[in-house]
Amino acid sequence: MKKLLISVFIFVALVAAFICGCNDESAALKQRIDSLEEKVADLENDNERLLEMLYGLGFQDGEFYSLQQAYDAGWITKEDLKSIAYYHNGGIEGNEEVMGADFEPQPKMPKVIDKMTELSIKQTYCNNLREESNAKPSGVTIERYYGAYSNCYAVVLDSIYIDHYANVVDEWKAVGEIQIHYTDHFFMTIWKGKGD
């Protein structure tokens, strides 16, 4: 975000230099550039203060992992996978033998994602796209939430930044002997805060 702000102000300074650089107004131009540099420094300081406030309110940096990666790392258990599959598949379909007919998934805890964690997840998604686009959290949607397991949030994300038609699938994938049925363009992922 800082780089974007700096780039914008440098661009503005260059445009100002081009427009005003015609005559002997170099002193005025230098003064304008100095003023813009001060504004950039002020914005960077404001950014730092805002980030500190967000972190104080519970915002955190995080990373996305596949179910397999989270399972292999020991962050989610086989029982967690069963609950995630139950919520994702809409029941025990594909896992009848492993779960049994009377399987009850773990309750989603928390029942809904708090606003700061939601913002953190969306911001992580945007950070992963930054080099390709100017992604913003407002363009990201948490389509489905399957619970938090040892501070790992199982979510299905969508955004205006992906081509939905290129990613349509209908396949089963096994993780720790638990079958997950993928039937649409959304992708399931595990988000884990870096501080966890």
Image (cartoon, helix red, strand yellow):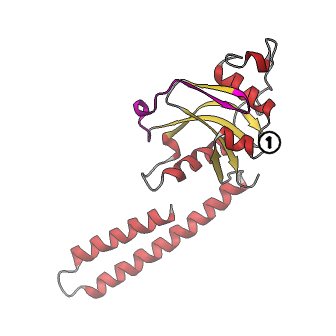
Residue 95 versus residue 194: which sits nearer the camera?
95
Check the image and name the residue furthest to the top.
101
Tell me the residue at 67%/16% (across/down): 93
Tell me the residue at 77%/39% (across/down): 76
Q: Quadrant of residue 85?
A: top right
- Report x, y in % for residue 175: 69, 33
Q: Quadrant of residue 70?
A: top right
Q: Is residue 139 left or right of residue 61?
A: left
Q: Is residue 164 magenta?
A: yes
Q: Is residue 18 magenta?
A: no
Q: Which residue is mark 1?
A: 150
Residue 180 versus residue 36: which sits nearer the camera?
180
Check the image and name the residue furthest to the left.
23
Above or below 8: residue 131: above
Q: Quadrant of residue 16?
A: bottom left
Tally of numbered tags: 1
Tell me the residue at 68%/53% (across/down): 60
Q: Is residue 71 left or right of residue 21?
A: right
Report the amino acid beneath label 1: Ser
Tell me the residue at 80%/17% (across/down): 103
- Report x, y in % for residue 29: 30, 81
Above or below 32: residue 147: above
Above or below 51: residue 11: below
Say what secondary structure mark 1 lies in.
loop
Q: Is residue 32 left or right of residue 81?
A: left
Residue 95 versus residue 89: which sits nearer the camera?
95
- Report x, y in % for residue 53: 67, 58
Bounds of the magenta span?
A: 161-178
Number of other residues with Cα within 10 Å of mark 1, as a class: few under 14, some 14 to 19, many 20 or more: few
